[in-house]
Image (cartoon, rainbow, N blue to C red):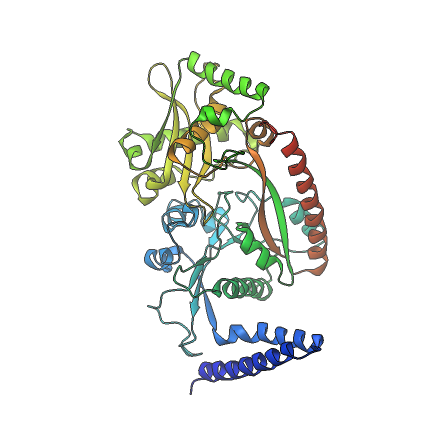
Amino acid sequence: MCSSSILLLVASIVLLVASIVLLVLLIMRPCRALLCNILLLLLCYMLPLCCPLHISLHPSIASIGASAWEACRSPASSPFTSYAFLSLLEESGCATKAKGWSPAHLAVYDVSEGTAESPASPTSPPLAVAPLYGKQHSLGEFIFDQAWAEAAINAGLPYYPKLLGAAPFSPVAGRRVLLAPGAPPGREREVLGAVAQFLETLVTENDLGGAHVNFLTKGEATHIAALPGWTRRSTLQFQFRNAHPETGLPFGSFEEYLSTFRSKRRITVNRERRRVREAGYAVSAVAGLAIRELPGIARTMHELYLSTIDKQGPYGRAYLTREFFEGAVAGDFCESLVLILARGPGGEIVAGTWNVVGGGDGGGEVFAGRHWGCVDASGSASCLHFECCYYASVEYCIEAGVAFMNPGSGGGDYKFLRGFDPAACDSVHYLPHPGLRAAVKNFCQQEAASIDEQIEYLAAESAKKAKG
């Protein structure tokens, strides 16, 4: 009998005996609370042994393969964790070792039927996959930990390289460990625990600064943060929810959405939209494969993207290459794209946004506003940003029945005043040094309390009418 089979047999016997004893103790009166707790702890440690997992590292998503990766996703999965998006980032030179993003993706296999010497057949489909990168910096993450890095370096502690589980350059929440839809119920907690432990081992054995998982779902964050050594962090974002505050039903029109605003804010929105029309701009949405019908659109969108980077001066970072935009339009990812384009009086594209629409990992379809740009130098485009990034995008969501809009990070004041509601998003962090870990945990607890207060305050001061 192979070693893994022996392990499985022993674990199963121990689990069976512990379960029987626990059941008897629960029936008895009075119940021995301490003994029950010990047996419950034993069950928690022995259960994973009954379904052993093997995790492998992959230097590119291509080494896992499109079919294996997509088999761990569902129609409700976020497009930012799709094979089409992640492979395009690698192939276009955006998320590569040269840019400080070294792919190290995870594939999780159920090897209960395998052997210790051959833990996973090369043809076996993975039980789960997860995007993972080795990072030499904190750029392009949108969970800002540079202050932690500075504190660690000042204390003589390593912070880079670090591990990051994330969808690069995409501050949009979604599953970060993708479990195959056909997996048995209850496997998610086991897989999340195994992945977290694997990350801890990688950090320890390779003297890395830590492991971080950004913009994961609340369920994932709750489970991982409950594990020893992990810390949960909350970050404030703003979003549009396509649901009337009184009925809970989707809005029937932009006018109905605007009717929920306070009078002063409603007047401001109408004035800003009117200025765009009076200046002679025409704003429209183009979605999916129809984008390919626009001549030179990939080059145009890349130029718009760079125009914003250039205006940011020394703080601007061009993470995406021209090849990325070209590949997105030409490849499978085009089906997830929505462009909001502003044309001048002559019909030329002078401004626009690059957006991604798709599943929200069970929370409803999400419109993610990602990149904005404007090349109009006439000086009459002052309201185009609000029209393209906010109003026309919300209008598209209402017309298309999209449940949520995430307009991206930053600019919270502008978004709040235009009807976007505050919401907390999550990340989890493992830092091996106990002193740094304690300091970060204390900081995150204070930060979370502050964010809760901000959300409560902003809810009372919303641009929308008070309920009731």
Which residue sits furthest bottom?
1
Quadrant for residue 395, please give it: top left
Q: Above or below — where is 92 with respect to 133?
A: above
Residue at 43% over, 47% down: 78
Residue 163 at least partly seen:
no
In which quadrant will I find the C terminus? top right
Residue 219 or 282: which is nearer the viewer? 219
Quadrant for residue 467, please give it: top right
In this rendering, position of residue 128 left or right of residue 216: left
Residue 290 or 297: which is nearer the viewer? 290
Which residue sits furthest left?
293
Residue 23 or 357: which is nearer the viewer? 23
Q: Above or below — where is 319 with respect to 222?
A: above
In this rendering, position of residue 370 left or right of residue 70: right
In which quadrant will I find the N terminus? bottom left
Rendering coords of residue 8 (x, y %): 48, 80
Rendering coords of residue 348 (x, y %): 34, 20
Rendering coords of residue 401 (x, y %): 40, 36
In this rendering, position of residue 185 left or right of residue 17: left
Q: Above or below — where is 354 with respect to 207?
A: above
Rendering coords of residue 34 (x, y %): 71, 75
Residue 452 at least partly seen:
yes
Residue 447 or 218: which is nearer the viewer? 218
Residue at 55% over, 32% down: 420
